[in-house]
Amino acid sequence: FCFSAIGFAQYSPGVNNNVTLLSHWDSYDVYSNIWGFVGSDGKEYAIIGHNQGTSFVDISDPSQPVERDMLPGPSANGTIWREIKTYDNYAYIVSEHTQPNSMSGVQIVDLSFLPDSVHLVTNYRWPGVTASNAKVHSVTVDVEHALLIIQGGTSTQGIAGGDPGGIRILSLATPSAPVSRATLPVRYAHDTYVRNNLLFASNIYEGGHIDIWNIADFDNINLIHSITYPNGFSHNSGISEDNNYLYSTDEVTGATVKTFRIENLWDADTSNDSEIDLTSEYIGDATQIAHNIHVKGSRAYLSHYAEGVKILDLSYPHDPVEVGYYDTYHDPDNGFVGAWGVYPYFNSGSFIVSDIQTGLYVMKFDEIGRGSILGTVYNSQTGDTIENAKLFFLEANKTLYTNENGFYQMKTSASFHTITISATGYFPTTTTLTLPQDDPYTLDIALQPENAFISLSRDSIGVVLDVDSASQEHFDISNTGNGTLRFTVDDVNGSQGNKSFTKYNPKNFNRKIFQSVRNARWNESVVNSNFKKEMELLVSDPSNDVIGASGKPDIQSLFGEKNDESITLKMKYYHPVNPDSETIGYALDTDQNPETGSSSIGIYLGDVGAEYDVFVTIPPIPWFGIPANTVLIFDNIAGGNPMVIPNAATVETDSSITISISLSSLGNDDGNINIAGSSYHWADSLGIYPPTTLDFIPNEGHTSLGIDPIGDVPWCSFNGEDFIRDSIVGMNSRRIFVNFDATGLEEDETFRGILKILSNDPNNTELHIPIVLETNEIVGVNERLQPYKFSLAQNYPNPFNPTTEIIYSLASPQTTTLKIYNLLGEEVATLVDNFQHAGNYNLKFNASKFSSGMYFYKLTSGNFVDMKKMLLMK
């Protein structure tokens, strides 16, 4: 074995806060859940599952963990899946794997021989299973009533009309020989928690769903209430020591740890048992997954996968506050990695954590209370509050932003904090303080403005090039303030218009998420691939937003995946798919241009121009000869009959419908596809028009699938550089050269992108210049495309001596004047006074005959008038 004893003289930001690591033990490859045991001699033990079995580690000296014994367990395909609980002097270990058969079922282990060894008493198998199929997902012990509860797997195998992964209750009157007393095969149960004869079942596949059963009488078990909530994946739960609050986790990204007030369950009035309210929610990093929660006193200990272990202060149950953490998994990752389980119930104050990759951690919470800080962030010069200012709490490793009124509030530990405050266009500042316990601390923060402001000389750039030729364009960035302008220029994939190509991203849902293969957890292929990466989550949909009828369909989310040959779309519902009426319509915009394409079959388009409509019918349409699970692709440009692809839609067991479409069937020109969709029901197998219900995804706009929206445009560069990062001092300019290269491109094609300019101008943090490259087979063509609006750019250079360049654009032919004025408003020069065609114009102004000072130049073209100032410095 190997171990390390580590003590911190101080906490390490991002690694731990208010939690001290006492030791770390790592002797196997991969680990699962953990539990604790205290022997009759008072010695403390960690019981941890891993890829070879279960280890029993003596942590009586928390700085020197010692493995006392290891019990092999089912390990087909290298499984690490183990769940453990203890009662009296026995441990009960379960797994969802059955190889070898001799180890399947519940391993009952006698712990009374510790610290010398442990003894396997038996592999218990319950009625209805054999050695080849006896598997359990998780196990619960009700110490008060000497009960062993197993759930998931095949816990209720063979019970007519029920789910084989239901709940089985066994008596531990004889701890070494459980006796089956009752079953609840109603639905698959992931985990249970028992308090005062009430069993709380987390039903992971039913969404947000916790059943509450009264199990006082095994012959008359009754359902008291079901707690349901949207977007859930109910995983486990725990109850406060006063019985008033239930805390639950959902094993999915973006889900909160929820607090339900359940005190009505314990009074004599049964009529109010359904009056259970959601009183609070806690969330760490919304891109990560909370796994297991355990309550001890006024604290909750939460294993949070990639975020490690977190400690919540529950002094005010309606307002849980994170007061400590230890990140056992330091790599930047998400999904099912890091801290699996936590056990906090030792009297010594130590607690233990299992990390999937790195084993056993022995820790101690340093008993810090909760604190609170609030205030406003404002401009030191004007006193105006600053919206979206960023406050980073270093020790707590938390970030928050001010609201539209410049207000912020942070609830965290009553301890030392280093806070960095920043906002675009302002100099950052850092402060340190120690928050008092409980009492809110008020801190208003002044930021000094940088006084840097950006101006661009061009609002679009376009060229027409022969194939295999190149050209260079330019634009100017000017700083019209007296501070220092810091900026970057990058080229990204884009759509037509002055908007960058972005994916629909409500509330941070635009993330890549991971799910394990639920019916084959922890097999070797899953472990070796660091879990199966599912399709990208393109957009999540509100629940209960369906139009019409009884609330179906109700889309939960849309997933997508693209490779070089096809795209795959998966629409997931909150409800089971109805194969007799479920129908989907997708509108696909393959050229990133909302002005092209039209709807041939009336699909909701959002803001896309659909080159293709995709109609997915789950039931057959007999009168058209269309079988079930068919995909029809309508070409809205070419017209004609749709492409009919039988058996191309799959109804999945997770209440979703998946389709795959070959890119060869779509005229996709750049890999980006904008998607708007809808799902609806037809009554009586498509016999009634219009549809009875309708749900859109997204509700507004579109989502996109394809080329990475922040990826470089291959035909654009900046003199060999991928991007530019620079700064400009006050009242100066910088010319940016943009190179267009048509080498290897097809003739008569249009390629679109965006120049994205980020700066510290608080009013223009991100600006865009659309760029377009058209290829032409005509030799010698090399001209700018017609601009789409009138504009007058800032002169370059500015200040100047004695010459400068003035650039302007005309969107249509107009009589045009360009004149120079001094500070008195007197006209001193006329540079243009004639009729000009639409286009982009560059003029040189020579001021060698003028004295130093401020001048104005004014462009008038039709109804367009604009004026800018320039500074001559001799």
Image (cartoon, grey):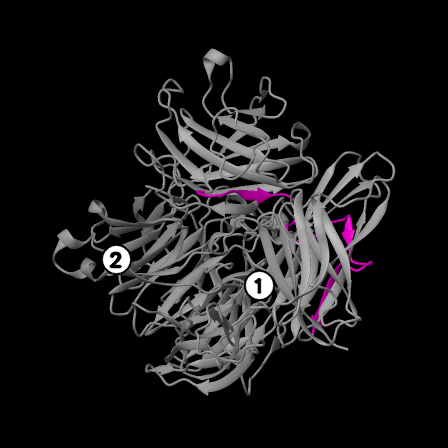
Q: On the rendered image, what quadrant is the C terminus found in? A: bottom right
Q: Position of residue 345 (x, y in %)?
A: 39, 72
Q: Position of residue 725 (x, y in %)?
A: 72, 67
| Main secondary structure of the magenta stretch | loop
Q: From this viewpoint, which residue is outermost toward the left? A: 269
Q: Is residue 713 magenta?
A: yes
Q: Amino acid at mark 1?
A: Asn
Answer with left or right where residue 642 lies relative to residue 779.
Answer: left
Q: Amino acid at mark 2?
A: Asp
Identify which residue is drawn at 72% across, 39% down.
750
Mark 1 → mark 2, Cα distance in angstroms: 44 Å
Please give the label number shown on residue 277.
Answer: 2
Residue nearest the viewer, comparing 762 with 190:
762
Name the residue tied to disc 1.
764
Q: Secondary structure at mark 2?
A: strand
Q: Position of residue 477 (x, y in %)?
A: 69, 64
Q: Is residue 683 magenta?
A: no
Residue nearest the viewer, comparing 94 with 547:
547
Label 1 or label 2, whichever lies nearer to me, is: 1
Mark 1 / mark 2, whichever is N-terminal? 2
